[in-house]
Amino acid sequence: MDIFEEIVLLRRAGRRGALATIVHSNGSIPSFESAKMLVRDDGTIAGTIGGGCVEAEVWQAAREVMEEEKPRSLTFNLNHDPKYDSGLVCGGTLDIYLEPILPVQTVYLFGAGHVSVNVYRAARMAGFEVIVVDDRESYANRERFPEAKDVYADDYERVLPQLAPNHSSYLVIVTRGHRDDMRVLRWAVETPAKYVGMIGSQRKVIAIYKELQREGTAPEKLERVYAPVGFEIGAITPEEIAIAIVAELIAVRRGVDSRQHKRSLKALELLRSGAPVSRSE
């Protein structure tokens, strides 16, 4: 299969990779300029840049490029380093460019109200694809979400089985009521999504957690939930709340969200302790 088709399949599956390309060469090398090798996140490869020790070193560097999500340039001098003398090369130098192949980052928005419209706009600007779900066709439509990947206007119970979030998915629950929030959260914590967040006060979050635990949802599954959703920036308007939410999504995407998640665990701590929650929380 063509290497670019492999990249498309990899990204659609929510997986990572790194693409190595020979961008410059001098002398005799075991391949040619523009030769490419794709290293997948499971260590398998497609294509080749010549084999031998060079390819082994590029493979190792590719693993780091995937993790860091940053490109890297490598230079190999095949003339003066004996470890490259495998009998397959005659000498020369080559420059290789390694770039990360990242999965499509998709935000699933449950609820299509005023906050969701602004989350959609900010998430799109931040490079996320967006899928919108709401049971009201007057809210979930292409007029309000013209660039969304998909828009579902149907009962949540009918839509949820059609969705297939993966490890690169972000689930944001901002429906219009406790009942729908709980229905979606019950499903969301069973998915492999990278992020699950739910809007609402501490009091609401604790009430929903308590009901889900009564139904049999394990507490550790709720530990991954960001609730109340969004960074604490004093947000009040739908636009401000959307910025707080998308900032949190970016923090999770970039791996700098640990402090924020500790705040989100407060609801579970209060639930376990049995401490009273004020109406302002």
Image (spheres, grey):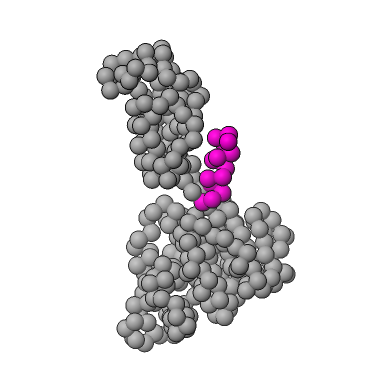
On the picture, is 126 further left or further right than 144?
Answer: left
Q: Say which quadrant the C terminus sits in.
A: bottom left
**Dominant secondary structure (helix, strand or loop) of the stretch shown in magenta:** helix
Q: Which residues are magenta?
A: 1-14
Residue 245 drawn at (x, y percent): 49, 63
The image shows residue 230 at horizontal and vertical percentages of 46, 65
Residue positioned 49% across, 25% down in the render: 35
> Residue 200, percent across and down?
49, 75
Figure label count: 0
User: Foreground residue, 15 or 126?
Assistant: 15
Which residue is at the far front?
87
Residue at image position (54%, 40%) is: 7
Residue 2 magenta = yes
When the figure is inspected, residue 52 is found, relative to residue 8, above or below; the finding is: above
Q: Give the residue at x 59% y 57%.
A: 130
Would you identify the image quadrant in which residue 83 lies? top left
* Direction left: furthest residue: 82
- Judge by depth and name the residue closer to the eye, 199 or 49: 49
* Residue at the spot 37% in from the left edge and 16% down from the top edge: 89
Left or right: 186 in relation to 162: left
Q: Is residue 20 above or below residue 245?
A: above
Instruction: Tell me: 106 left or right of 250.
Output: right
User: Residue 234: percent from the left, percent from the top?
Assistant: 45, 68
**Is residue 92 inside the magenta stretch?**
no
The answer to whether one can see residue 52 in this image is: yes
Q: Decide if residue 118 is in sight here.
A: no
Q: Quadrant of residue 175?
A: bottom right
Q: Quadrant of the N terminus?
A: top right
